[in-house]
């Protein structure tokens, strides 16, 4: 199963979340997820083009947990191997719920992260994939890394079909 056959969800924060949503919109891949009430993000309210549902309050942790809960698995993308803050919390929520989680990082991570991602989707029967990672203010390069991984996964999925 390739990237284009699944639904991508995230919380809509800048950085990794937003890059995944922008990728989904550009390639006409189903997307969604939960965002805090008021469509909160570090750069202001999340634009309407992102088809996310607001949680009852503005709690970032609630949207993070609900995106983990409502997906089949979570991929976390980061620049380095160490995770902090909400990104680390995402992994903890996934483990607590017994949901599969994959961490891909750019600096010293897997040589072919796009193939790891496709394997994770296939091996876990993922139909709804939660995408998480640091916000842009914490990792300015993460959006480009997310886009690169997803574009390469899309190309690899087409090559393998």
Image: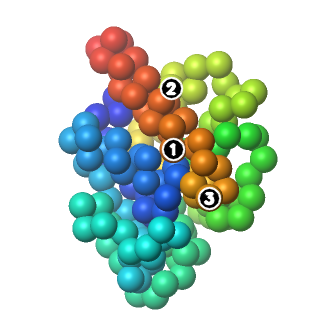
Q: What distance separates the C-alpha of mark 1 from that of mark 3?
A: 11 Å
Dot label at residue 143: 1
Display coloring: rainbow
Q: Position of residue 142 (x, y in %)?
A: 58, 43
At label 1, counting other C-alpha atoms closer than 10 Å, the crowd grade (few under 14, some 14-19, many 20 or more) is many
Residue 123 in sight in this render: no
Which residue is located at x 65 percent, y 65 percent? 86
Q: Quadrant of the N terminus?
A: top left
Which residue is located at x 66 percent, y 32 percent? 106
Q: Secondary structure beneath disc 2?
A: helix
Relative vertical location of residue 144 with respect to residue 1 in this rendering, above or below: below
Which residue is located at x 45 percent, y 36 percent? 147
Q: Position of residue 76 (x, y in %)?
A: 59, 47
Relative vertical location of residue 158 with respect to residue 35 in this rendering, above or below: above
Quadrant in which residue 85 is drawn: bottom right
Dot label at residue 69: none
Nearer to us: label 2 or label 3: 3
Which residue is located at x 67 percent, y 56 percent? 138
Q: Secondary structure beneath disc 3?
A: loop
Q: Is residue 129 left or right of residue 7?
A: right
| Number of marks present in the image shown | 3
Q: Out of 119 and 37, give the one closest to the viewer.
A: 37
**For marks 1 and 2 on the same chain, the one whose residue lies earlier in the sequence:** 2
Q: Position of residue 103 (x, y in %)?
A: 64, 41
| Residue carrying label 2 | 114
**For marks 2 and 3 on the same chain, the one whose residue lies earlier in the sequence:** 2
At label 3, counting other C-alpha atoms closer than 10 Å, the crowd grade (few under 14, some 14-19, many 20 or more) is few
From this viewpoint, which residue is outermost toward the bottom? 57
């Amino acid at each position: 199963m390739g990237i284009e056959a699944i639904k991508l969800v995230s919380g809509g924060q800048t950085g990794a979340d937003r890059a995944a949503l922008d990728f989904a919109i550009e390639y006409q891949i189903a997307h969604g997820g939960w965002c805090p009430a008021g469509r909160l993000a570090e750069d202001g309210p999340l634009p309407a083009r992102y088809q996310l549902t607001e949680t009852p309050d503005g709690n970032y942790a609630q949207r993070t947990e609900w995106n983990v809960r409502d997906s089949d698995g979570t991929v976390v993308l980061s620049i380095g191997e160490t995770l902090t803050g909400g990104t680390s919390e995402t992994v903890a929520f996934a483990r607590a719920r017994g949901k599969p989680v994959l961490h891909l990082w750019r600096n010293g991570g897997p040589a072919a992260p796009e193939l790891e991602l496709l394997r994770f989707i296939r091996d876990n029967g993922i139909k709804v994939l939660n995408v998480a990672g640091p916000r842009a203010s914490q990792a300015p390069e993460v959006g480009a890394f997310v886009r690169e991984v997803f574009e390469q996964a899309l190309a690899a999925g087409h090559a393998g079909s």
